[in-house]
Amino acid sequence: MGGIPAVVVTGAAGLGLVDGLAAPSDPLRPPDGAPLTTHGIAEEPVSVLLLARTPPSPAVTGLRPGDLADARRLDASDAALPLAHLRTAAGGGAFRSALRYDGIDLRTLTALAAAGHGRTLLPRSTATGVPGAVAVPLTAPRVVHRTELLDGGAPRGAAAETARRLTGV
């Protein structure tokens, strides 16, 4: 176990936020053996960001993960939904990466997609309205971008207040 869940489990942080792809209303899969409590914070549809020079036909109302198997993809796991999450949602598949982007700046990532360097999966609110690009919903199976709050027990102090504000509980 690494990253944010590990910091919460060890007590180095009282809370952590994680995100990923999931079926609607399903929680993200927690790390095996991690004594964590998760709280859903946000959930929104996922879109594929396409270069506007090659927009989909007007009849295309969405894309399936399998439709992206041969597409050039931007591998930007720190800024967009990781390629591994797409493989899991699609039940496997050989999705190829055209370009790796190790940054976290969404403007740079969306500019790379709009310039034709590859497609990327983003939450709909992030993918919509990108100059030079078209956002097409990802469908069948329907997946969402989900954000969850992690805690390792009963948060105290500022962590408890933050958790209460984020979860409404």
Image: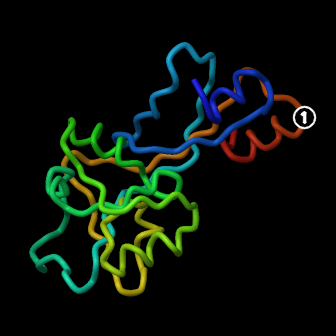
Of residues 102 and 77, the one nearer the viewer is 102
Task: Locate the C terminus and report the quarter of the image it occupies.
Answer: top right
User: Crowdedness of circle 1 by 10 Å Cα count: few (<14), some, many (20+)?
Assistant: few
- Residue in the picture at 90% in, 34% down: 157
Residue at x 53%, y 68% (from the top left corner): 106
Count of numbered labels shown in the rendering: 1
Q: Which residue is mark 1?
A: 157
Q: Give the residue type that dot 1 points to.
A: Gly
Instruction: Say which quarter of the image contains residue 91.
Output: top left
Task: Identify the image quadrant of residue 16.
Answer: top right
Residue 54, given in percent of the width and then of the height, sits at 19, 81
- Report whether 57 appears left or right of 151: left
Does dot 1 land on a helix, a strand or a loop?
helix
Q: Is residue 46 above or below residue 113?
A: above
Is 70 placed left or right of 13 in the picture? Answer: left
Q: Residue 121 at x, y = what percent?
A: 36, 59
Image vertical order of residue 68 relative to residue 161, above or below: below
Q: Quarter of the image for the N terminus: give it.
A: top right
Q: Nearer the viewer, residue 88 or 100?
A: 100
Query: Residue pushed farthest front?
Result: 99
Q: Residue at x 53, y 53 (%)?
A: 78
Tell me where residue 92 appears, x and y as whole percent.
Answer: 21, 37
Name which residue lies at 29% across and 37% down.
88
Pinpoint residue 68: horizontal percent, then vertical percent. Answer: 19, 57
Quarter where residue 162 is shown: top right
71 in relation to 147, above or below = below
